């Protein structure tokens, strides 16, 4: 009997998970379907760009600076063993634009903006604001979800680019200003080695994918949250956990597609 | 109640998770009247209101508004119908990221192409009607419960709806706010020539302002009539409800095992 109930519980869990994926896919489809209104009234997206993008600037800049500084230190220590300290700029830049910029910025975005989106929409649901909007004949997916979705998709690559830029500056501060790596080699080797299409554009594509996935998870969890304090709290936690795992798994998949054999 | 009927409910049944929530509901809401649906918490009155708003589809029967059966409408048809309705939610449901002004202007901006200076004048007039013109720049978090309810009322009236629904409009209000909201509901209904449905369990305040009352219990209508008829009604349930008696058809004790057995006492 214990075995049967375990199998039943596993089956129930799998059916629920598949069901939820289906509901999330439908939610994504509806978000795209009702996005037209957001672009016709672009001020709705701009307002959300402020709360998702602009309000994430400080955490992105500070984290980017410190990650770049650590990369500068660790990179210098490693490269010194091979007498290649002058390649520090290349190492810092490639590490950031290919991997750390998009991934770290997405993780930070999920923690700050994603959790805020989930909590906000979950609370709107709990306080009947979404029901009120529906009763006013205003589609909440068009009015609430779509502008936030596009704000997340637009702001993510910009935040990742900023993270990488500030990180490179952090690497420069530690490598060139503090340790004394030659400034000319630092910048010129970076310029020569970093390819716009192979490295920068692939990084941008990664951050676009992460932005889409993280924002979608955050909005879906908020919209699907049970309208209670416990429900909103659980949804917020799920947003951060699911987004973080999705980012790391997708990063592997995208890296394998983009950089294999390059 | 011989006036033309705006909302007609016939043989409405609704089952949720195999549990019958509404059974054989028949109601009529004449144009221009203020009708209350009363009953204990959990008796199905909010579910009924959600049917009238088109948020739920009946298992059997129908809700007809202005000649149209709600559950037969597609989303565009339902939204077109909802533009002619207003609903005041229990705690106002004001949009917390918008000011009082923007809350009241919301529907005007969403559904009309009115110029902003005309919207401004309309918003000021709506807020003036509920006595809160001076709060236009405040955020919902700065308002008291009664004020939030009045702003929500102004927002509900924004497009002069033909049907206004109120879900527990008196819940959690102090006596002054309660009287103010009650008076506003009556006066705004008459001024707009609208039809209003109030779902409430606040018997004393409701009987002062409504034209007709339906009493519900366990998903069915157990009594109906004018406030005067209900005050004089001798039905056990209505008498217990109207006079707030502690025990009666609605028992004080929730059903459970024998008291002595629960206390582990030997007989």
Image (cartoon, rainbow, N blue to C red):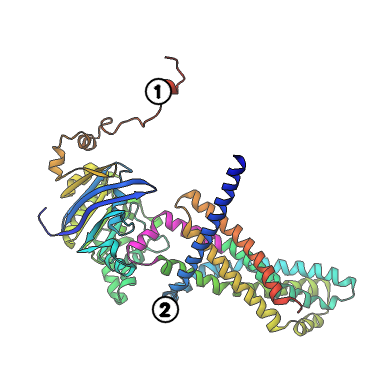
Looking at the rendered structure, the secondary structure element under dot 1 is: helix
The magenta span reads A113-139
User: Gap between marks 2 and 1, in whole Å?
Assistant: 66 Å
Q: Where on the picture, by quarter, is residue A249?
A: bottom right
Chain bearing mark 2: A
* Residue A252 shows up from this direction: yes
Q: How many marks?
A: 2
Q: Residue furthest left?
A: B2
* Residue B139 shows up from this direction: no
Residue B133, image x and y in percent?
A: 29, 62
Q: Which residue is mark 2?
A: A40
Looking at the rendered structure, the secondary structure element under dot 2 is: helix
Q: Which residue is mark 1?
A: B259
Question: Which residue does the image show at 64% across and 61% down from the upper left?
Answer: A245
Residue B206, image x and y in percent?
A: 21, 46
Question: Which residue does the image show at 69% across and 75% down from the upper left?
Answer: A257
Q: Which mark is residue B241?
A: none
Residue A211, image x and y in percent?
A: 58, 70
Pick the front one: B203 or B22: B22
Chain bearing mark 1: B
Q: Is residue B57 above or below residue A190?
A: above
Could you tell me what secondary structure mostly forms the magenta stretch? helix
Locate residue A111 relative to residue B217 in the image: left or right: right
Residue A203, image x and y in percent?
A: 66, 76
Q: Is residue A170 above or below residue B16?
A: below
Question: Which residue does the image show at 74% across and 81% down from the upper left?
Answer: A194
Callout 2 touching callout 1 (CB < 8 Å)? no
Q: Residue furthest top?
A: B267
Q: Residues within 10 Å of mark 2 (few under 14, many from 20)?
A: few
Pick the front one: A101 or A24: A24
Image quadrant occupied by the C terminus of chain B: top left
């Amino acid at each position: 009997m214990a075995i049967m109930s375990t199998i039943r519980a596993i089956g129930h869990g799998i059916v629920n998970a598949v069901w939820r994926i289906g509901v999330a896919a439908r939610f994504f489809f509806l978000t795209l379907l009702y996005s037209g209104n957001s672009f016709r009234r672009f001020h709705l997206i701009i307002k959300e760009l402020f709360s998702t993008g602009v309000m994430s600037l400080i955490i992105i800049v500070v984290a980017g600076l410190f990650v770049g500084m650590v990369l500068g230190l660790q990179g210098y220590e490693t490269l010194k063993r091979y007498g290649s300290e002058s390649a520090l700029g290349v190492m810092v830049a490639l590490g950031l634009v290919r991997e750390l910029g998009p991934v770290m910025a997405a993780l930070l975005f999920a923690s700050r903006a994603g959790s805020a989106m989930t909590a906000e929409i979950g609370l709107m649901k709990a306080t009947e604001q979404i029901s009120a909007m529906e009763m006013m004949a205003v589609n909440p997916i068009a009015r609430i979800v779509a502008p936030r979705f596009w704000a997340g998709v637009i702001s993510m690559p910009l935040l990742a680019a900023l993270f990488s830029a500030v990180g490179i500056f952090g690497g420069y501060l530690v490598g060139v200003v503090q340790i004394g790596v030659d400034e000319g080699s630092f910048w010129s080797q970076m310029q020569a080695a970093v390819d716009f299409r192979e490295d920068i554009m692939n990084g941008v594509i990664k951050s676009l994918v992460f932005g889409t996935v993280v924002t979608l998870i955050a909005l879906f969890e908020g919209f699907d949250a049970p309208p209670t304090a416990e429900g909103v709290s659980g949804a917020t936690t799920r947003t951060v956990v699911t987004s973080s795992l999705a980012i790391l798994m997708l990063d592997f998949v995208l890296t394998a597609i983009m950089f294999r054999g390059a | 109640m011989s006036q033309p009927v705006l909302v007609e409910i016939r043989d409405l049944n609704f089952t949720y998770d195999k549990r019958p929530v509404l059974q054989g509901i028949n109601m009529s809401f004449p144009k221009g009247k203020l009708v209350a649906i009363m009953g204990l918490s959990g008796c199905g009155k909010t579910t009924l209101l959600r049917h009238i708003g088109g948020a739920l589809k009946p298992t059997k029967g129908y809700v007809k508004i202005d000649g149209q059966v709600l559950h037969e409408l597609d989303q565009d048809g339902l939204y077109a119908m909802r533009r002619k309705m207003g609903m005041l939610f229990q705690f106002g449901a004001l949009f917390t990221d918008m000011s009082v002004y923007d809350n009241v202007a919301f529907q005007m901006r969403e559904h009309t192409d009115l110029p902003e200076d005309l919207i401004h004048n309309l918003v000021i007039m709506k807020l003036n009607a509920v006595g809160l013109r001076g709060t236009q720049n405040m955020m919902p978090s700065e308002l008291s419960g009664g004020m939030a309810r009045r702003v929500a009322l102004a927002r509900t009236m924004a497009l002069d709806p033909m049907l206004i629904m109120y879900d527990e409009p008196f819940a959690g209000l102090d006596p002054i706010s309660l009287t103010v909201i009650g008076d506003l509901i009556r006066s705004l209904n008459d001024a707009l020539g609208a039809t209003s449905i109030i779902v409430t369990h606040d018997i004393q305040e409701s009987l002062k302002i409504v034209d007709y009352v339906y009493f519900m219990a366990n998903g069915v209508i157990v009594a109906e009539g004018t406030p005067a008829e209900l005050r004089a009604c001798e039905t056990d349930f209505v008498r217990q409800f109207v006079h707030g008696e502690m025990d009666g058809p609605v028992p004080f004790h929730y059903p459970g095992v024998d008291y002595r057995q629960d206390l582990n006492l030997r007989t």
